[in-house]
Image: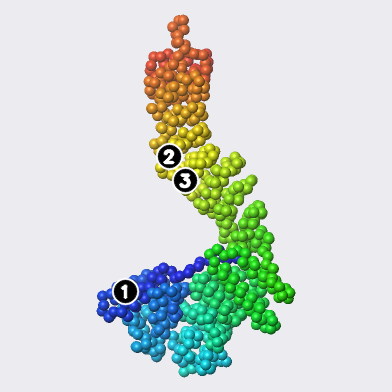
Amino acid sequence: MTSIDTPDRTAPKRDLNAFLVAMSVALHRYSMYPSDHPSIDPGVEDVFRRANELLADRATIAFGVARRQLIIDGVATDSNQAVLRRLAEGLHAHHLGAVSLHSGIQVDEIADALLLLSAEPQREGQLGLTRDGQVPVWPHLKLHPLTFDGLSLIGDASLSSDGSDGTGDTLGTELWLGLARAALSGNEAARAESVPSEPSEVAEAIDNHPSAKAYDQAIVGYLLQISQQLKVASGAEGEALRKKTSSLIGSLRSDTLRRLVNMGGDVAQRGEFVLNATHGMTVSAVLRSVEAAAQTSGETISDGLLRMLSKLAAQAKSGTAHARPRADAELRDQVSRLTADWNLADPNPEHYGRILQQLASSDSAEASGTAPVVHFSREPFRVVQMSLECGVFGPLVSKALTRVVDAGQLGAIQVLLDTQPRHAGPVSTAIQAAFAEPETLRILATREPVDFELLESLGPHMTMDAYHVLLDALVTSDVRATRRKLLDLLTRAELDLSDAIAQRLENTPWYAQRNMLVLFQRRGQMPDGLSLTPWISHRDGRVRAEAIRLQLQIPGGRDPAVLTALDDADPRIATLGLREAMKQCPPAAVPRVAELALEPEAGDGVRCLAASALGRVRQPRALGALLTLADGGHSLLGRRKLPPRTPILLASIKALAQQRAEDPRAVSILAAAARSSDPELRQAAQGAAA
């Protein structure tokens, strides 16, 4: 399982990389042109500017030098990058192990150092091979030399293949001597005529040296190169280098080894270091490298797996003649497969489980002479529970969560999340984020009954892809209650879903189109330029009604929406238009409202709403319609009388009272209503008297 907060980098940060590139370019110009050439100063100033930008928030810039790459801020540069490789090779040719710049550096210091470094090492001598004190020192810039003189190889295993003292000019010899000199730099013993470079003494020097970037990066640079050389080294020299390096790894303190592996770069480079180690170091050194690389990469190896790897290492070292080669090969193979999973962008989540099972069954398999049978755990719930208890999350947990969803155990997982330990907060968040993945959500949103409480809790973790899944479920679900709750859930979404909603307005069932229009209304958002005409004229009245409601919310769209609603043959939509007209009737809509008020076939409900709307309009057409509705003619004595009492008459009297019209006919009708024996008519007419 993988810790969820693991920052991995495959290259130095951009500003650090740019600084190194600028230094390489400036040094290259010094080597090509005379010091007074006009292209020199811009290069130096670029290095100075970038160095000061970096030193604004740090006291020192330090980078180590390997043969073909540089190590800065814990990351090795790409050895195939021509510009940075040129700088590494130039500094290495001068036998320099590191360069450090300090806050307050001056442009003259950089210029002097670059001029000195531009000298041909073969003709004018290597800076790192000068006597102590001869390398120029600047107040804010230091070149750290690594010399090979004064070292001797003491012990049974020489790095030389010809039986000499081991100082032969071969790559393995040079790398080991460079590592030893780097480790002993600053040590008074290093100035002696003969400095032993036994692995235990080198390890002790590294352990006891105060941690400093320039020092650590120089050590790491040689370790990276040695691990690569071990992969191809052969013969007596290769065997000697393997033994010495393995002994060094075994002698280092655990905290020192973790510090150096962490300085060595990103997950991929650490994995490469361990993979190379499996080909060249002893099994005990491989095991220590695996532990250090796992810890610094944010990987967690279970105690059970470590015990099994240790068991294999012990068998490879002191087992029977038959077991030693098999245990050695098995350990290296399993470590290679394990570290391969760390480097994959999408690692196989079953790989780790297979390794555990294979190692666990290795004894019985060896005894029987048959290949081990590989199985994968069938208890996903327990895997999730262990993840919460341990506070780690990784590929196995993701696989288990998928199986939990398939098995319908979400309720049990929710109980786990509700009762999680304090340290499991990040893991709980990671589990909820996994549930919010589109494929998982598709299962959650389509399996009836839908667990909306769980879906609600996943809201903060949902991406746009996740909301696409919920919108699809809103379109395809056959259960009205589910669609209603999905509608409520989508209404509260924090992301802008306008475009996603608009995509589902066409070629979907009428109820889906209606729901999309409802979502636009509730969320108060819709794409710019979206025309509602196709839905305002939709054949289904329910879709038309929602389209008109939506158009009422659009700036400048209210009046046209009211007119469209009043002209609709569906009484429900006409009622929608009349209710809006009661709030504020557009002048152009007054004739249509008057027609509805006078239309006997429109129905009492529609006619009453129309009369009420007319009461809020001061237009002759509105007054004329109301007088027609409330005029019952005259009695035999010539007095104004009212028509038989109906809801239409009552609504008309109220509307006339609101009009406060001075027309004699309106005054006489309201007077007749005030004299009526019907209390409701008298109350309706009181508006005029007030």
Looking at marks 1 and 3 on the same chain, the residue that comes earlier in the sequence is marked by 1
In the image, 527 versus 219, the foreground residue is 527
Q: Amino acid at mark 2?
A: Ser
Q: Residue furthest top?
A: 636
Q: Tell me the residue that label 1 is attached to.
A: 43
The percent position of residue 616, horizontal first and vertical second, equals 42, 25
Q: Disc 3 on helix, strand or loop?
A: helix
197 vs 60, left or right, is: right
Q: Amino acid at mark 3?
A: Ser
In the image, 343 versus 136, the foreground residue is 343
The percent position of residue 261, horizontal first and vertical second, equals 52, 75
Is residue 51 visible in this depiction of the protein?
A: no
Residue at 45% from the left image edge and 5% from the top image edge: 637
Residue at 54% from the left image edge and 77% from the top image edge: 276
Q: Residues within 10 Å of mark 3 (few under 14, many from 20)?
A: some
Q: Residue furthest right?
A: 368
Q: Measured along the vertical axis of the image, is residue 666 above or below residue 254?
A: above
Q: Tell me the residue that label 2 is attached to.
A: 531
Looking at marks 2 and 3 on the same chain, the residue that comes earlier in the sequence is marked by 3
Q: Residues within 10 Å of mark 2 (few under 14, many from 20)?
A: few
Q: Measured along the vertical axis of the image, is residue 496 above or below residue 138?
A: above
Q: Disc 2 on helix, strand or loop?
A: loop
Say if mark 1 contacts mark 3, CB within 8 Å: no
Which quadrant of the figure has residue 669? top left
